[in-house]
């Protein structure tokens, strides 16, 4: 995921940025509300993580401004304010979730993925997955990007669907081998890399936005907007 983090506390901001990057997220850390507002205007993010109390512009003010601009990107508010009234105020302003400091980074990660899955930027049914520019028709084994057909082999199609079902999540080569080829297969991990290479050439090659990403030492992931 591509995450905008707005946190004025140097220690907490640095630690949060570090932990999120360890999970292979792309993080832009802003240290006050004004910087965060400028970053919002300049970039595209999968989720916003905003501290409530920041100099320049509070997280709550920023939430309201984001929603007034018709930006529906998921927002998670971080705050030490634990009164029920405060939580209600944050949610009514337009935040999608709320975490009270101090928090466990494992819980933050879980909440971010929950927000990412719920966001209204893709459509999924038993027949089709549509994420960003790419649509996979599951029963017809067909893929289109910007309404242009992409011819894939059956294995390439299965691999793409696996990545799309776990959009934003890094899948290891072992996980892909298990889910696409099966544990009993005598196929090696090199086959995963080779199939990914062919798939990226077909799906991403002609386009500026790259949806299938290689994460060094970890695996591969599908992103909706590229990075």
Image (spheres, helix red, strand yellow):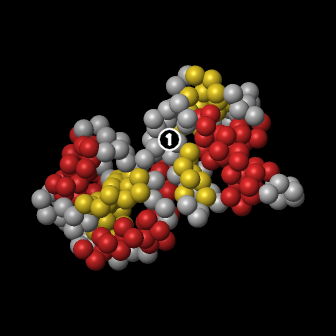
In this view, 34 is above or below 19: above
Residue 121 horizontal/vertical position (percent)? 46, 39
Occupied quadrant, residue 10: bottom left
Query: Circle 1: is it few (<14), some (14-19), or many (20+) Cα within 10 Å?
Result: some
Q: Looking at the picture, tell me which residue is in the foreground, 99 or 20.
A: 20
Residue 195 position in % (x across, y down): 71, 45
Q: Is residue 121 above or below residue 58?
A: above
Name which residue lies at 86% across and 55% down. 185
**Residue 15, quarter of picture:** bottom left
> What residue sits 49% from the left and 71% below the top?
106
Nearer to us in this view, 142 or 77: 142
Q: Residue 119: tell me if it is visible.
A: yes
In percent of width and height, residue 124 lies at 59, 37
Q: Is residue 34 shown left or right of residue 134?
A: left
- Tell how many labels: 1
Residue lying at 56% horizontally and 28% vertically, measured from the top left:
145
Say if residue 160 shows up in the picture.
Answer: no
Question: Which residue ends up furthest to the left in the rendered image?
Answer: 56
Which residue in the protein does label 1 denote?
210
**Residue 179 place in picture, x, y as percent:** 74, 53
Looking at the image, is 110 positioned above or below residue 65? below
């Amino acid at each position: 995921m591509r995450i905008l983090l707005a946190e004025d506390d140097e220690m907490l901001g640095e630690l949060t940025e570090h932990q999120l990057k360890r999970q292979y997220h792309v993080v832009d850390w802003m240290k006050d509300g004004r910087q965060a507002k400028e970053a919002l205007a300049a970039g595209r993010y999968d989720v916003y993580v905003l501290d409530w109390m920041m100099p320049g512009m509070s997280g709550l003010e920023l939430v309201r401004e984001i929603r007034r601009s018709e930006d529906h990107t998921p927002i998670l508010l971080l705050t030490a304010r634990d009164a029920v009234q405060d939580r209600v105020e944050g949610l009514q302003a337009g935040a999608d979730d709320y975490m009270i400091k101090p928090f466990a980074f494992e819980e933050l990660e879980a909440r971010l993925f929950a927000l990412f899955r719920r966001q209204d930027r893709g459509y999924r049914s038993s027949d089709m997955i549509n994420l960003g520019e790419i649509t996979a028709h599951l029963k017809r084994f067909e893929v289109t990007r910007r309404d242009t057909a992409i011819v894939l082999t059956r294995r390439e199609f299965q691999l793409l669907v696996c990545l799309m079902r776990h959009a934003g999540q890094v899948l290891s080569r072992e996980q892909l081998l298990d889910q696409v080829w099966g544990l009993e297969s005598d196929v090696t991990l090199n086959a995963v890399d080779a199939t990914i290479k062919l798939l990226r050439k077909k799906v991403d090659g002609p386009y500026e936005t790259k949806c299938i990403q290689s994460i060094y030492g970890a695996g591969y992931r599908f992103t909706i907007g590229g990075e």
